[in-house]
Structure formats: structure tokens, C-alpha cells
Amino acid sequence: MSVLEMKNIKKSFGSKVVLKDITLKVEKGEVVSIIGPSGSGKSTLLRCATFLEHIDNGEISYIGKKVVTKGADGAVYPPKKELQQACSNFGLVFQNFNLFPHFSVMKNIADAPIVIQKRNKDEVYKEVRELLEKVGIGDKENSYPCELSGGQQQRVAIARALALHPAMLYFDEPTSALDPEITAEILRVLKSLAAEKMTMVIVTHEIDFARAVSDRVVFMDGGMVIEEGRPEDVIDNPGNERTKMFLKKLHV
Amino acid sequence: MDNTRISKKFVYLFIMAVFAGFIFVGNTCQAKQEFIVGFDAEFPPYGYMDENGEYTGFDLDLAAEVCKRNGWTLVKRPISWNTKDSELESGAISCIWNGFTMNGREKQYTWSTPYVDNSQVVITRNDSGIKELKDLSGKILAVQTDSSALAALEGEDATDENKALAQSLKELQQVEDYNSAFMNLESGMVDAIAMDIGVAAYQLSSKSDIFIMLDEKLSSEEYGIGFKLGNTELRDKVQLTLLDMLEDGTFDSIVKKWGLGDSACLSLEDTTYIDGGRVPSPGSNGVDNQDNTDNNLEDTDTQDNVKSSAPKAGKMSIAQIVKQLSTGLAATVGIFVLTLLFSMPLGLVVAAARMSKYKIPQWIAKIYISILRGTPLMLQLIVVFFAPYYVFKISTPYAYRFYAVIIGFSLNYSAYFAEIYRSGIQSIPQGQREAAQIMGYNRGQTFFRIIFPQMVKRVLPPVTNEVITLVKDTSLAFALSYAEMFTLAKQVAAAQKSLVPLFVAGVFYYIFNFIVALLMERIEKRLDYYK
């Protein structure tokens, strides 16, 4: 069963068409990278998939359950409660992390499981400590986000998303705010998640990173999926002219 | 954990403040019939504050005796001269008894017969070179707002000579009270003051070396007691009691005590009111004539030289002034605390409406903010106080004066706080809300757990500004004659003919604000643990 299924997604901002007719499926345990030039619509696609933007028309399902359906006058969204419920299927690691500055690292991660999922406090704390250990910042639970480096903040953001036990994770440009040497460490964290069969969708413009981490690469341009397939096919032997041009520019 | 402790403290504080408010208000409930005399507390010798902080004066002594004989409770209510008609109309006071000139106002009040003959005179510095009225040409003349002197110069019934005199002036400067008029004169900001002879004599008694009174008079007029138009019942009772006092000599002894021997004119011969009614004759109605041989007023003054025997407000030491103002300080702190308590949460509600995605609450909030920020706070206080009577015809109890101050201040400050909150909320990155949304926080949880705490930190500096402004703004409660510190300071200043009480008030405000600033700084430091 697909974890995520997006069908015929259309989205415009005013008269500018951003997503023309996108269809995307992500299977359980898959790691998919979405690449493409800026303005190609890849970030918008991610925002639509996470309900931060409303699509104009199309269909979005999580784990076989339709959340947004096609309608005669555009997409039909479910009531707030149901949409909130659908949000529990995924986690999102923002480009700039969006940690809560007034919460400690522990509270950033533990607050939602305790307050929203009503889970046992001690259990959550225990799990958070394990998660922090796993992402390599076991000693930072009492720090505040402003005291952490960019790479450390990102690990907190990942742990925060994982603590809610989502079926899949989204990453929005995970490497753009980081120094090159830290990128390698994040790659290691993502690879270990992939080894645990975590389903992940990563929006990035860093080709090497995409090649290293993903099972499948989706190349987008002009609001359309131009090409998709295994990284060694799409990145190393692109079939499409636009993919070739994009990759060429990056390599020059 | 820390947060809950802080909010608990606030809850306790709130409960305590509300109780304090009730005790405050509860005190004013009384069973006996009240006779509420409205007077300008900056108008010696008719009504002013003495060195012990008591309101005293010729008119108040008369009123006290009238009340004693009728078994009423006398309430001395200092009012702002600008709002005296509204106070009377709304029933907040029973009468205006305060060197109140009848001439020119005959048809606006129900009057007693005249009891003091009062002329309008001109005071100037003795080195000004002004010897007679025509010398005033090209000079600046000060008068009290809505006073008889102003009416004598520019009113409908002003004589042609006086109108010509007013025309020839460089400027006719209106002042709020006589104390500031004399400060203006002493410092040369104005050349002369036109005023009632009784008040002039009181002022000259201590400053005859600086000021002189011109021999020529602007006009001759009389004082009466003004009641609400049509309230002849109360007027007759008071009139009758006054005539009784005249008959048994009590009236004269009070006149002598205050050194007004030349101008008292209450007469048993005067048998018709200016509104045409018959003056009742003493002893003919049910007023209980108490034996008042024990009245200690009679032996207070036996001197012949009446002018010099006029009592003066004794000089107050700084310590006495401080003690006086301290009583007002409690009222000031009360206004301050209660205003913050109500306006801060109310501001949050207004800010929420202002940022609502629905048009109607948005517009209501916009108009609310626009009006409250766009009009003077003093005017808003007056509107809140008088609206129940003028709009809804509801007579308000005395306690309402205090409520009106709190309501007026809270509404006004909530508008400012609302805009501060809004800017604080809008400055928080959208990503915070998006992160919360994806993690499953609902709107309320997002606001109270994520947005609000961050907003508090961001708005602290502008809120501190606003809070400090509020400390000083409490003085605007004088518009409703609420006896907070600055109102008292002005009254003491008038009685003392000195600026010192105002400076003392200034020191109080400074210390108050210093403490407020210190507290706010500590709160800011406490929130410094994150950026």
C-alpha cells in the first residue's frame, strides 16, 4: 500500500500556475528525492502534501485513505478535525527547523506527544532521550534552541518529528542551511533512518545528496514531473533534455 | 513549571485587587439622607483644602450648619468647574454652593436668594503701571474658565464698556483655576486677573506686597446657591434653614469667621426668588430649629477688622504635604493596578478581533481602536461618567465615579495594548504556526503554548512604555474629580498658593515609575533565557 498518493494536483498563485498536473506515489520504506531548479514547484508540492497550502484540484491520500478529493469546483478538504488527524501520518523537518525558541530541547520534542497525543510523561521523556541519543545530541536535552548550532537544531527537528511516530517524514531542503561538513553527518542520520525502513520524501537541489540518500529521484520543472526513476538513471543517464540541461548547469 | 507558578500569582493578585475594589466602594454606602455640595476645591475662601487635608471654607461652613439642622449628612464633593452642570443634572451633586454667581445664569438653575454680594475686580502686580481699567488696553488679562469675570467681559449681558474693554485687550487668557492664574501673574505671563472680590481679597491677604486691586470694578453681582432647575423642594428647605440661621445670628457669625462682613447680603426682606416663587418664612414649615447655643462658631471672631481676620490655610510643611498626597497615592495606585488588570486581557480580545479572518469583528475592532486612540482620554472619561445619565437617563451612585475612572482607563489602554499585541503576534514567524499545525496543535493550543509566550517577550519593551505612561495618565482622573494624587496636589497647591505640592507630586510619580521600570526590567531579564 502506498503511504502517500497524490493524483492530478493543480495549484496556482493568482494567474501563475505552479503545479500543472502532478501525480506522485510513495511506497512504504521508500526514500524519494524531489529535485529541480528553483521555481520548479517542488517546495510548493511539499507544502501541498503537508496541507500547509490548499490545492486547487486533485486528490491526496495517506495510507490508502483519501483525505483531499476531487470536486466539480475544485479540491474538497475534510473538516478541520479530520485534516488534523491526517497530519499525524507525517512529520516535516523545515528548512529553517522552526523549533520553538521558548521551549527547551526536551520540551520541543516532548510537548506534542504529551499534550496532543496524551501519552504518559515518563514514557515520552524516556523515548525522547533515546531519540536524542540516536541523532547524536544526547547531552542537549536541557539546552534552548538558540544555544545550538544549525546542525544540532536540525537533529532536534528530526527527533521532534519522529517522536510523534509518523508513517513518513518530509524534509524541506535539509542541507541548505548547513555547512558542507555537517551535511555529511545529516546524510548519516537519514541513512540510518532509511535502514529502519522509514518512508521519506526529501526536497533538495543538492544532486549528490539526492543520489546518496534516495531510492528514487523525481525531477520537476515548470510545475510538472519531467522524469523519475532510480538515481543512477535520472542523475547519471538522464533521458530528458531539460533534465540534462539542469544537471549540466549544476556540474559546470 | 515556572509558568504555572507565575499565573497562580496573578490569579491571587487579581482576587485581592477585586476585593480591594469592593471594600473601597462599599465604604460609601450610607443610610442617612445625603446633601451633596458640589464645589471647586481650588476656590478659597469659599471652598478649599486646609493644611489638615480637610475641605473647608465659608460656603462649606454654611452648608454644614444647614445639614446639621436638617439631620442630613453633608457630603463635600469637589468637582471640576467644566462639568458642574453635568454633575448637577445627573444628580451626582445636590447643589452648587461655591461662590456661585447668579447674574447671567438666572434661568439655568433654581436659585436661593442671594447671600453674598460679589463684585468682579481686577488684580495686577503693583509694578505693572496699570492704575485703572483703561490701562488694560493691549495687555493680557486672565479669567477663570466659565467664570463670572468672563461673563462680565464677554457674556450676553456684558455691558458695552466691558465689551469694549475686552476688545481692547491683547488677549483674554482663560485659566483652569486661580492658583495658576496667580502664578501666571506673578511670573509675568499675564498682566492682570479679573475675578471675584472675595477670592481676590483672600489672595491679597498674603501677597499684598506684590499685587494690588484696581479701585474700578468690572461689575457688581451676587452669589446664590444653584439647584437643579425645578428642584424647588430642596431649595426651599435650604433657603428656610438659611433664614433661620440669619435670624438667630449663626449666619453672621460664620460671615465674620471668614472675614466676609462687607459682602454678606442674605436678607429677610428679600421675599421673592428670581424665578418668581415666594420665599417661605422662617418657622412656618417643618424645619426643626435646633438650639445652637453650643455652636462654637459664634465665639471664633470678635475682631473689628474683618479683612485681616480672614483665616488663611496654615503653611504646610513638606512632611504635611507628603502626608496629604499619600492618601491620594493609594487612589493613584488603585487606578493603576485595576486598569492594568482589566486593560491587558481586554487588549488581547480586541487584538484577536482585529486579526480575525471575519470582516465584522475586524471592523468593530478597527473602529474601537481608532476612536479610543483618536480622542483624548480625558474626554473618554467624561463620556463614560455622564453617558448613563444623558443617554440612558440612569442616575448613577457615587461609587460610579470610581468605576467610570477604571472603565474609561481600561477601555483606552486596551486599544493601545491591542495594537502592541497585534504587532507582537505578527512579528512571530509564520513557520512557528506551521510547525505547530503539522504537529497537531489546534488553534487554541498553538496560541497559548507557542505564540502567546513568544509574544509576551516581544511586546515587553512597548508595554513597559505604556505602563509608565499610565502612571502619569492616572492624573487625568481629575477630569472626574476623583481624588487621586494629582487632584489633591492641585487642591493643596491652590490653598497653599504654592507650587511645592505639585513638585512633591512629581517626585511621587518619579519614584512610582522608577519602581515600575525596575520591575519590568526584572521580568525582561527572566525572559532572557531564549532569543
Image (tube, coloured by chain):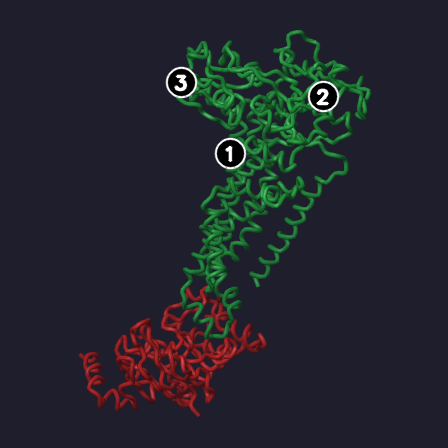
Chain colours: A red, B green
Provide the residue designation for mark 3: B168
Residue B35: which quarter of the image? top right
Q: Which mark is residue A197?
A: none
Q: CA distance from mark 1 to mark 2?
A: 50 Å
Provide the residue designation for mark 1: B506
Residue B110: which quarter of the image? top right
Q: Nearer the viewer, residue A172 or B168?
A: B168
Furthest residue in direction bottom, as rendered? A1
Q: Amino acid at mark 1?
A: Gly
Chain letter belonging to callout 3:
B
Q: Earlier in the sequence, mark 3 or mark 1?
A: 3
Is residue A101 visible in the rendered image? The answer is yes
Chain letter belonging to callout 2:
B
Q: Is residue B440 left or right of residue B58?
A: left
Q: Mark 1 vs mark 2: tell me if same chain.
A: yes
Task: Please state which of the two labelled residues, at mark 3 or mark 1, is closer to the viewer.
Answer: 3
Image coordinates for residue B233, horizontal then vertical, percent: 72, 30
Chain letter belonging to callout 1:
B
Q: Is residue B505 left or right of residue B398?
A: left
User: Residue at position x 38%, y 17% from top?
Assistant: B138
Q: Earlier in the sequence, mark 2 or mark 3?
A: 3
Image coordinates for residue B339, horizontal then vertical, percent: 56, 47
Task: Please state which of the two labelled residues, at mark 1 or mark 2, is closer to the viewer.
Answer: 2
Q: Amino acid at mark 3?
A: Ser
